[in-house]
Image: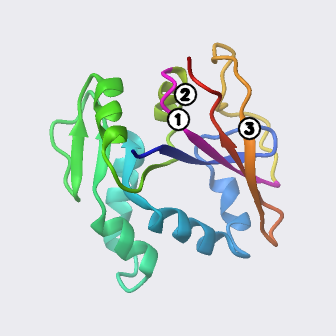
Amino acid sequence: MSEVVVLMHVSLDGAVTDPPWARPSRYGGHEKYQLGQVAASRALLLGRVTFQEMAAAWPWRDAKEEYTRLVDAMPKYVVSTSLEHVPWSGVLIPGQMAEHIAKLRAEPGQDLLVLGGAELVGHLLRLGLVDVLKLCVHPETVGAGRRLFPESGVPGTWTLTGTSVFASGAVVLEYRAPARP
């Protein structure tokens, strides 16, 4: 059985959207960490916006980099109600997201990795479809922006299962989801 693992970048004051503020902190071991997360996954699970941004940027990446090769080759499950076709090893999840993801989770193999996408992650959290949440907290405050857990979030106690600290001051806090009834 696979798990849904979310890797989300967040500012110190909790903002998760459009994180150009995270770029300076992504050095000092972070690239190696991110590569490890991709290597430990069998597919990406992405929202429409994240998928389109990545697909547009990927032709400009260095094809010799291991991270680029891994992401390029792996399946990308794209949750969208507006797209009709997804290129770049994409598989469209057009509706009934919970059912599709439940089927993907039931398959054997490595995990499904969600790279950002505040809207998708919010839906996954509300539906109880996130097994592991890895928050990469950057030492920046931005003052405004979308939050990962809006006021209408689902209450629960997550269990801290690991941490990673980078020379930049960024830290990854790894949490396991609350037990489901």
Q: Looking at this rendering, what residue extends furthest in the bottom direction?
A: 64
Q: Residue at x 56, y 17 (%)?
A: 181
Q: Is residue 156 magenta?
A: no
Q: Amino acid at mark 3?
A: Thr
Give the left or right position of residue 178, taking residue 112 as reference.
Answer: right
Residues at marks 2 and 3, CA–CA distance in whole angstroms: 15 Å
The residue where tag 2 is placed is: 125
Q: Looking at this rendering, what residue extends furthest in the left direction?
A: 85
Residues at marks 1 and 2, CA–CA distance in whole angstroms: 6 Å
Quadrant where the N terminus is found in the figure: top left
Q: Residue at x 66, y 26 (%)?
A: 149
Q: What span is colored magenta in the figure?
A: 127-139
N-term mark: 1 or 3: 1
Pointers 1 and 2 in contact (CB under 8 A)? yes
The residue where tag 1 is placed is: 130
Label 3 sits on a secondary structure element that is strand
Can the viewer see residue 172 in this picture?
no
**Nearest the eye: 85 or 56:** 85
Residue 159's label in the rendered image is 3
N-term mark: 2 or 3: 2
